[in-house]
Amino acid sequence: MRAPAEDPPGPTRTPWVARRVRLRRTVRFGAGPEWSLSQLGATGAAMGGVAVYLASLSFAVGGFDALWWALVLLPLVTMAWAGSAAPVVYWTLLLYGWFTLTSAGSFSWWSLPAAAGCVVGHAAAALSASSPPAGSFTAATTRRWVRHTALAFAAAVPVAILAGLLAGRSPGLVPAAYVIGLGGVAAGLWFVRTSPPVERL
Amino acid sequence: MQPWRPHRTATRRLGGWEPTAAHQRAILLAAGGAIVAVVGRRADLLVIVAPLVVAALWGHLVRPRTEVTATARLGDTTLREGSATGVYVTTEPALHDVHGVVTLAQAPWVERKPSSGIAELEDGAATLGLRSTRWGRRRVGTVSVALVSTWGAFRAGPVDLPDLDSATLPVPASFDASAPTPHPRGIVGLNRSNRPGSGSEFNTIRRFHPGDRLRRIHWPVSMRTGALHVTSTFTDEDAHVFLLVDCFSDVGPREGIDGRPTSLDVTVRAAGAISEHFLRSNDRLTLRTVGAAEVPTLGVGSGTNHLRRVLDTLAAISPATERRDTGEHAIRGVDPNALCLVLSPLIDPTMVTLAHTLAARGMTVVVVDTFPEHLVADPSSVYQALAWRIRLLSRDAEVHNLRLRGVPVVPWRGAGSLDQVLRDIARRASAPRMARR
């Protein structure tokens, strides 16, 4: 009798796959796409950022119409378009709100938590856009984004201290501030230009 | 016909790094906020956009400048129904601080693990699981890879990698037969023949002849009679089994290994089970298909390697892809002593005709009825039940005609399905018969 050759693969070769593939839960709202808990967490962080920003603005200007608190829902409403122009639109609206509600030449220390809310909202939307709705983020990725966000926020502290020091000074520095500020903006834009420029087809 | 070669590995470049909406947002808000802050003398606005300035510069400075290549590799290209394997995706070079996402698109009869089919690249590698739930050759879902740099500022991809292929072999149903295979003729099988010779089945005890093996000497009888006697055995022989598989019909909902079987599921799994049984008994087996295009022709063979080839051939079946097939080619050159097993749900009349043709040639033909009972068991639709009833009445008439010709039709019931009919055939072969003089 001949020795049996290698058997065809059997139906029980699954355990290593189960070990190496990480299963994650997803949520579905009605007929929409599946959303991972990580994505919902990122949206929650973006909403928290807007909430902190609005709260800071409220404290800085001594309150505003309660209707504006509905802006907290904007990241939730635009959750499916985190990778589009929607976040820039509502953040422009929020910054415009700060510009209109505060008076020229004033400075409030509440701008510091507002900066935190702004950078958290930006980072959360960017993280959300980096993965499909059902995609999850590992703990390492989340930690990295938190670390980067904290470091970026740290830049607001010296600016706030500098602004706080200069807030009550004479306006003689205004032309110089214009030059320095606009020069900085121009240098920044020159720095982040696309090199070489992107070809338009 | 070109042999089927599954694509196990797929590689593609992800292309250049493009700025994302997040990066453009950071630049716009930072620049716009800074300008408005300076022009409008809003120092606190400058504080608010300062982190965005950092984010924009940081994302720009650390943007990846190398082109990345993604590779997807399938763990196993040959699976069994219900078994799982993995898709390993790697990127070269593995970039630090780059967030990568791998997506495996949905494909029929492929379950993804995780069910979203999305995995995150960790250190440039990710693993996705997939489970094949139905036999056949198919592409697993398209793998696409996207990488995003620090701060989500630049993106490469998503790029679809070339498709990967896999073959899923049918899981044979449980089958065993205790009855002998009719017409054994070879020299290597496990079937007892009527000829004395080297084998394992006891025949008689006879006097020693020159050439007999010494270990066959029966010492008690030799001592008693005073002359050397040996144990004589019947030779072991192998039979030839010819499987004819009906690929015309695939009736019923296709629910895979976890659901109810279609008629072709039953046929293919039964063919696999019967092949496994006879090939493990060292019988020779030929498999032919009717009604399926591009199925490779399989010659006669035996053993486990041939079983693998049979299962591969069964996996290559695409139902009803050659409706003009009359089956004449399939039954050409069949060994006249072969046991012909026709596996069919007997929906298409071609298979009934072929069974009649084989029987008319004087061959031993058994029709294995693979019609799944659950198709007519569902009383939810009155009209469907009525239609089935009419069709089954017509089918019963065809089955009756086959039986009148002496072709047994046995329903597929798994283990022991063929015992009774094979015993009847063996008995019929040894029974007295009329002969023309």
Image (cartoon, grey):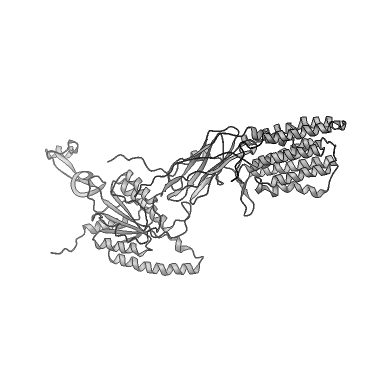
| Residue B197 shows in this picture | yes
Q: Residue at x 22, y 43 (%)?
A: B199
Query: Per the image, is B277 magenta?
Result: no
Image check: A196 left or right of B217? right
Image check: B292 left or right of A86? left
Q: Residue at x 79, y 44 (%)?
A: A97
Residue B72 x %, y %: 49, 40
Image check: B31 left or right of B95? right
Q: In the rendered image of this protein, does residue B238 appear above or below residue B353?
A: above
Q: Which residues are magenta?
A: A6-14
Residue A26 x %, y %: 61, 46
Secondary structure mainly formed by the magenta segment? loop
Q: Residue at x 72, y 46 (%)?
A: A89
Q: In the rendered image of this protein, does residue B196 appear above or below residue B260?
A: above
Seen from the viewer's position, the closer of residues B75 and B69 is B69
Residue A18 x %, y %: 52, 40
| Residue B55 shows in this picture | no
Seen from the viewer's position, the closer of residues A102 and B387 is A102
| Residue A100 quadrant | top right
Residue A131 x %, y %: 61, 43
Seen from the viewer's position, the closer of residues B192 and B343 is B343
